Amino acid sequence: MLNTGSTSADSTLVANQGPPLWLLAELTYRCPLQCPYCSNPLEFANHKDELTTAQWIDVFTQARALGAAQLGFSGGEPLVRDDLVELIEAARELGFYTNLITSGMGLTEQKVNAFKQAGLDHIQISFQASDAEINNMLAGSRKAFDQKLAMARAVKAAGYPMVLNFVTHRHNIDEIEKIIELCLALEADFVELATCQYYGWAHLNRAGLLPTKAQLDHAEAVTQRYRLKLAAENHPCKLILVTPDYYEERPKGCMNGWGNIFLSITPDGTALPCHSARQLPVTFPNVTAHSLSHIWYDSFGFNRFRGYEWMSEPCRSCDEKEKDFGGCRCQAYMLTGDATQADPVCSKSPHHDKILAARAEADLPQPPIEALTFRNERNSRIICKS
Ligand code: FES
């Protein structure tokens, strides 16, 4: 168990620490969909409280004063908050570049236009698959696919840059060509083909989601073929393929370093250095009790993995530690039970066998999509009780 007490920060760390640049406002854990790869905490049913409109605006004001420039509205599904226009307006007045990250469920043409008028810069709509059947099964809604198509068109018509996000996994990654074709037909400007990252519900369902290496290689080859074709045609669409780090030999520099540029606020006001940190045995501060300045610069939680002192071997003496910071703290904790360990993705980690085992598991037949544990209140309550 890590130290969970409150302690004043090392003065050298504070002196060297820049401001948060990226603020993620997780407005709510409520969501009409039930994606089995959601990154929300498994026990979200235990966290029902939400900050009020005034409390969120106070958070934005403090974050902007510290130097934050980008603000993402996320969830859950942020559209279930009926104060979204007000929050966008406030963020815009403060000078944030704002981004709405949504499933598109609950979106209407009127809302798309109202958000535009309020000053929203950017809407990212996520899809589950390129065909209605798999998309709707994964989303847990028979109407999801048609609604997403209609809203993607409405976003484009309103003059936003069109950013589509497709979460890929072993059940849909072989359809990558169809996915890209759909994005081109929708006139997307940016397409993020994001293979699941294994946090929250995706970690719970990892065996049923992780693609094989052969599937990934195929997806990379198809994406590259399309990139070359689009470039040759001077086509404006950009394809971004995000692959799972489970097939890497070195870890990612998660969040660009712990408490370095990224600040996430959960629906109840808990401040986190990444969207997944709530699961760690570390006490994190809440914006209802502390100023953001204290939280960012002085709180125990935000200083816990800054710098290099906390590292154990092989990270401590590794000449790559300034590049990858030992990898992801949440992944180290999920896979080893100890957040001070090297991320097992690293081939130098004594726990790298866990990643190799996951790769081997991906090569075995896995149960169908229906067998995944879907992210919903009922399953969350069962998990909370167990
Ligand atoms: Fe929490 Fe990587 S997701 S440190």
Image (tube, rainbow, N blue to C red):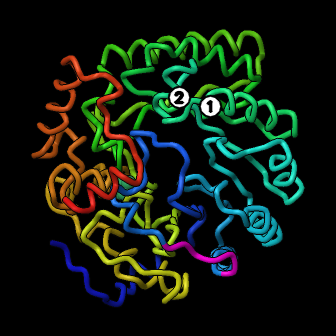
- Provide the residue designation for mark 2: 136
> Tag 2's secondary structure?
helix
* Position in image of residue 207 (x %, y %): 24, 32
Q: Is residue 288 above or below residue 53?
A: below
Q: Is residue 104 visible?
A: yes
Which residue is located at x 69 percent, y 46 percent?
Answer: 106
Q: Is residue 334 above or below residue 273?
A: above
Q: Give amino acid for label 1.
A: Lys
**Apparent side of residue 322 relative to residue 385 in the rendered image (left or right):** right
Report the magenta stretch's main SS: loop
Percent of width and height locating residue 296: 49, 78
Tell me: residue 312, above or below residue 155. Answer: below
Residue 322 can be seen in this image: no
How far from the left and from the top, in percent, is residue 127?
58, 32
Disc 1 is placed on an element classified as loop
Question: Which of the pair 33/354 is nearer the observer?
Answer: 33
Residue 242 lies in the magenta stretch: no
Circles 2, 1 touching at the beta carbon (< 8 Å): yes
Q: Position of residue 41 (x, y in %)?
A: 37, 57
Instruction: Tell me the quadrant of the picture where the C terminus can be found.
Output: bottom left
The span shown in magenta is: 49-54
Residue at (54, 87) in percent of width and height: 291
Residue beneath disc 1: 143
Which of the 4 quarters of the picture holds residue 105? top right
- Name the residue at 26% across, 55% down: 383
240 sits to left or right of 218 = right
